Amino acid sequence: MQGGSSGIGYGLKYQARCISDVKADTDYTSFLTGTLSLKEENEVHLLRLSSGGSELICEGLFSHPNEIWDLASCPFDQRIFSTVFSTGESYGAAIWQIPELYGQLNSPQLERVASLDAHVGKINCVLWWPSGRCDKLISMDEQNIFLWSLDCSNKSAEVLSKDSAGMLHSLSGGAWDPHDVNAVAATGESSVQFWDLRTMKKVNSIERAHVRGVDYNPKREHILITAEDESGIHVWDLRKAKAPVQELPGHTHWTWAVKCNPEYDGLILSAGTDSAVNLWYASASSTNNKAPESPVESTRERVNLLLNSYTDYEDSVYGLAWSSREPWVFASLSYDGRVVIESVKPFLPRL
Amino acid sequence: MATEAAPMDEKAKRMRDLLSSFYTPDPSISTPTSSISTSFDNINGPSFDADQYMDLMIKKSNLDVLLQRHVQMAAEIKNLDTDLQMLVYENYNKFISATDTIKRMKSNIFGMEGNMDQLLHKIMSVQSRSDGVNTSLFEKREHIEKLHRTRNLLRKVQQFIYDLPARLQKCIKSEAYGDAVRFYTGAMPILKVYGDTSFKDCRRASEEAIETIIKNLQTKLFSDSESIQARAEAAVLLKQLDVPVDSLKDKLLEKLEQSLDGLQINPDEASKLAEHNVSSKDEESNNQGPAKIHEDAVRGFSEAMRAYREIFPDSEERLFKLARALTTTHFENMELYIRKRVSAADFLGIFREYSAFPPADVLLLSNSLRIIWEDVVLMDEVLPEAALSDLSAEAAQVTLKQFVARTFSHLQQDISDTLLKFDINQKEVVDGEVLKVVLEASGKAEFRQLLDENTGIFVKMNDLLIGWIQKGFQDFFSEKIHAGLILVLAQLSVVIEQKVIPRIAEEITASFSGGNSQAFIPGELCRVFHAASEKLLQHYIDTRTQKISNVLRKRFKTPNWVKHKEPREVHMYVDMLLQQLEEVGKEVKQILPQGTFRKHKRSDSNGSNTTTSSRSTTLHSDKMARSNSQRARSQLFETHLAKLFKQKVEIFTKVEFTQESVVTTTVKLCLKSLQEYVRLQTFNRSGFQQIQLDIQFLKAPLKETVEDEAAIDFLLDEVIVAASERCLDVTPLEPPILDKLIQAKLAKSKEHNNNNNKTTVSS
C-alpha cells in the first residue's frame, strides 16, 4: 500500500509461514517455501530469481502431505531439505529429496529420505549446521532436543543423542552456531539455552522471556541476536551474557524472526507481526563502545540504526531468509502466502 | 695811467669784497664803506660801471680832486694787492698744513685694523667672564629667594602653632573633630621636632586638646546611637591620630558577628512564612513582615560591611570570612530545613491537602533561595572580591541537588507506595517547580560570573539535570515497579518538554541578554525529553501488553484445542483481559489528558471509518450465517477478497498522549496478540466455537472503551477468521445460542459485582 516498492512478488496458493534459502545452489539465487493449510493439499515451491533479478520463477512445485510449520534447506545438497509438519493433531519431521526428473513430471512426488520420528510432542524445528557439510541434524520439540546422524545414501537417520530441557521450558525454536559445530541455542519459555552437543548437556542460558527468533552472527563469534515478543531485538555477546550488548526497538507488535546477513557484519533483518520487515544496522563499533554516551547522542544513534522498514505486506511476516549467493537479497513471506524478494542495496550505509 | 689804476683799484676792491664775503659770512661788516657810496659811485657794487664813473668824475670834479682821487685810489689798490697776497699766502699756508695733516692721518690709520681686532677680542672675553659670574651666582640667588620664602612660611607656621591650642579648643566646642584632627596632624611633626623649644607650651596645650578629642571620638565610635557613617569617620580620625585601632576593630567585628546571629534565624522565619502560606492564603500580608525585617537587617549588615571595609581596609579577609560564614550558615540552615521538611511524615499530606497551592516546600525553597540570593547580591556589591556569588552558586547547587535528590527519592518511594490513591499532578508540579527553581537560581547565580565560567557551569547544570532525571528514570526501570509509574514519568517528560524547558529558556535569555545561548539549547533538550516521553509511553504500553500477553499465552498453551469440549460459557480469560484493560483505563484516566475529540458513536455517525467497519461486519455475519461444507475454502477466498476491497485498516498508529489513544493502542496490540496466538493453534469445532463466543462477548465492552471502533471490529473479525482458518471443522454457533450464553455471562458478572465489589475474582 505504501507505494514505491521495488520488491518482486510471488503468490502462494495458501497461507504459509516458512521460507528458506537454498544455500547449496551456487548457480542461482533460489528459495524453498512451503504452505500451511490445514485442509487443502500443501505444496513446496522452489523459487528461482531470474538472472536479471527482475522475476521470480517457480522452478518446481511439489506436493507435501501435511501443512508445513518449518522448512530448512540442506546447506550442502540443493535437492535435500527438511520439513516439520502437522496433521492438526500430531506432528512429524522429515528429510526430503527433490526428485531427479521433476522437470518432466507433472506433479512430482518428493522422495522421503528419512523421517525424524523419535518425537512425541509438538516439533518446532529441524536445524542443519549452517557452515558446511555435516552429516548431523538437530531437531527440537517442546521438551527435547535430538541429535541425528543422517545418511543420505542409505536413506536413514539415527538418533545419536538426546536431552530433555524439562517440562517447564517448552522450547520453541533454535539456532546452530556456525562457528562451533558443537554449540546450539534453543529458545524457551523463559530463557535462551545453550547446549554442548558433545556431552549433550546444557551449558549456559540467557534469562529472557518469550524469545521468538534467534540467530548467530555468521561473521563474528559469540554474537547472538534474539527477537522477542514485546521487547524488540537484542544483541548478545555470549561471553558476557548478563546483559545485551545492544538493543533495537523491534516492531510495533511482536518481532517474530531475526536474521543476520551472511556477508555484511551488523546488517540485521527482522520480521514482525505488524506486517513489516525492518532492516537494521548494528555496527560492530557501536557494540564495542559500551561507554555511556550523552543521551542526545544515543537517541540520534538509535534513529540511524533503522535503515529501512518494508511495510508493503498485507499480513504478519513469519518467514525471512537472506540469500547466501547474493547477500544483498532477501526473501520474506507473509502469512497470506506472498513471497517478496527485496534488495537492500539502496539502503546500505557507506561502509 | 690813472685810468689804468682806477680799474685796477676797482677790480681789487671787488676781489676784496668777494674774498671777504667768502671768508666772513657777514658782508655788512666787511664793506661798510661801499654801503655809504651811492649806487653809481659804489665801486664795490655789482652794477658798477667804470666808464660811467669816469665820465661822472671828470665832469664833476676838478683836477685836484681828481688827483686826490687818483692818489687815494692808487693807495687803495696797493692795499688790496697786499691784502690779496696775504690772503693767498694764508690760504696756501692752510693748504699745506691740511696736506700735512692728511699725510699724518694716513700714516695713523694704517695700524688701526689690528688694533680693532684686538679690541673685539678683548670685549668678547669680557662678556664671557661676566656670564660666568652671573651663573655662578644664580644658585645662590635662588637659594636666597627660597630661604626668603621659607622664612615667610615659618613666620606663618609659627603663627599657626601659636594659635593651635585656641583653634583646637574652638573645634572641640563646635565638634568639628575632622578639622581639629587635620590641624593637629598638620602641626604634629613640628611639635614633635621642636616641641622642646619655644613651642613647649603650645604643644602641651594642643596635646591636651587632642586627648579630649580622642576621648570624644572613642565614645562616638562605640555608641550605637551614632550613624555608621559618623562612626566610620570617627574610626578614620582615630586612625589618623595614630591611636591603636586594631583592638577597636576586633571589638567592632565581634559586634558584627553578634549581629550576624540575629540574621541567621532566617530559615526559620522563612519556614514560618511558608507555613503561613500553607495555612491560609489571606495571611499573605503577614509573610511580608518577616521578609521585610530580614531584608532590612541584611541591608544594615551590608552597610556596616561597607563602612567597615572603608574603615579598616586591611580587615577584608576577616569580612570575607564573615560573609562567607553567613552564606554558608544560610545554606546549612536551608539544608537542615530541607532535610527536616522532606523527611517529615506529612510530606504527602501537604501536597494532597493543599493541592490548590504550589507545594509548600518548593515555595519555601525558592523563597529562601531568593532571599539568600538577594543577600548575596547586597553583600557582593560591598565585597566583590569575596566571590560570594561563586560561593553561593556552588552552595545553591549543592543544596538544590540535595533537594532534588531527596524529593526524587521520596517521590519514588511515595509513588511506588501509593500510586493510585495519589493525585499525580501534584508531583509533576513539584518536579516542575524544582527544576524551575534550580534553573532560576543557577541563572541568577551565574549572572555575575565570567562568561566562560558561565558556559561551563551551564553545561554542567544541563548535564546534571538530564543526569538526575535519567538516573531517576533508570532507577525506576531497574526496579520492577508499577506500570502506572512509567506513565507518570511519560507525562512528566511531556510536562518538562512543554512547560519547564521554555521557562528555563526564558529565564536564561532574561539572565543573559548578551546572547550567550550556545550553552543551553532548548530545542535539543526538548527533543531529549520528547524522545524520553515517547519511549516511556511505549514502555508503558509494552509492559501492559506484556502482562495481557501472559494471560493470553497461558490461555492458549494449556488446553488441547483439538480436543476441546463444547463451549458452555465465556471463558474466564476474557474477564482477566477486561480487568487488565480496565486497569489500564483507570491509570490512564488519572494521568493523561483527555483527547481532543470524543469517540464516534456508531449510531450517530456516518464517518468514513463507520462504512469500512460496517462492511467488514456484514461480510463477517454473512460468513457466520452460512454453514455449508465448503465454507473453509470459500472463507479464505472471501477474506482475501474482503481485504482487497477493504481499505487497509491502520492497526498500528502513532500513540498520542491522550487517554483514548493509549487505551486504543493497548487494546489493538492485545487483539493482535490474540490473533497471533490463535494462528499458532489448531482447533476442533468446539474450540472454534469457544473462540467465537469469547470474541463475541468481548465486542461490546471493548467498543465502549475504545476510540477506533473500525480497527477493533476489524481485529476481532481477524481473530475469528484466524480461528476458522486453523479449525478442522468450522461450524459456528447459532446466533440464538451465542446470545444466550452471552446473556448468561452478563447476568453472572452483574450478580458477581453486586455480591462483592472488593475484588474482581475470576469466575
Image: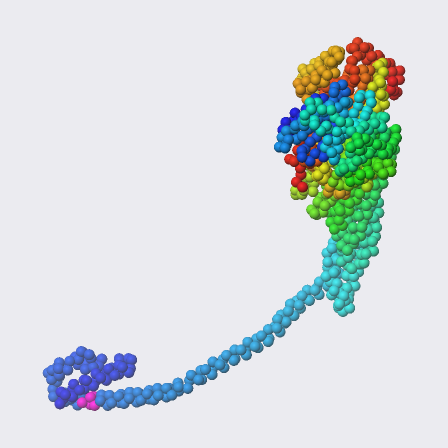
Quadrant of the image for the N terminus of chain B?
bottom left
Name the residue located 83 percent from the left edge and 19 percent from the top edge.
B562
Question: Which quarter of the picture shows residue A53?
Answer: top right
> Nearest the camera: B576 or A121?
A121
Question: Which quarter of the picture shows residue B575?
Answer: top right
Q: Position of residue B660 (x, y in %)?
A: 74, 23
Question: Which quarter of the picture shows residue B736?
Answer: top right
Furthest residue to the top?
A: B736
Name the residue located 84 percent from the left edge and 24 percent from the top edge.
B557
On the question of residue B741 being in view, the answer is yes
Q: Position of residue B308 (x, y in %)?
A: 77, 51
Where is A180 relative to B743, above or below?
Answer: below
Q: Is residue B91 left or right of residue A30?
A: left
Q: Position of residue B248 (x, y in %)?
A: 82, 54
Where is A222 relative to B750, above or below?
Answer: below
Q: Position of residue A51 (x, y in %)?
A: 63, 33
On the question of residue B351 being in view, the answer is no
Where is B249 relative to B652, above or below?
Answer: below
- What type of secondary structure mainly makes up the magenta span? helix
Quadrant of the image for the C terminus of chain B?
top right
> Nearest the camera: B675 or B454?
B675
Where is B105 relative to B217, above or below?
Answer: below
Name the residue located 67 percent from the left edge and 33 percent from the top edge.
A28
How many numbered circles are shown? 0
Question: Magenta stretch containing residue A160, yes or no?
Answer: no
> Nearest the camera: B299 or B180?
B299
Bounds of the magenta span? B74-78
Name the residue located 71 percent from the left edge and 62 percent from the top edge.
B160
Q: How is the image coloured?
A: rainbow
> Nearest the camera: A101 or B519?
A101
Q: Is residue B473 left or right of residue A26?
A: right
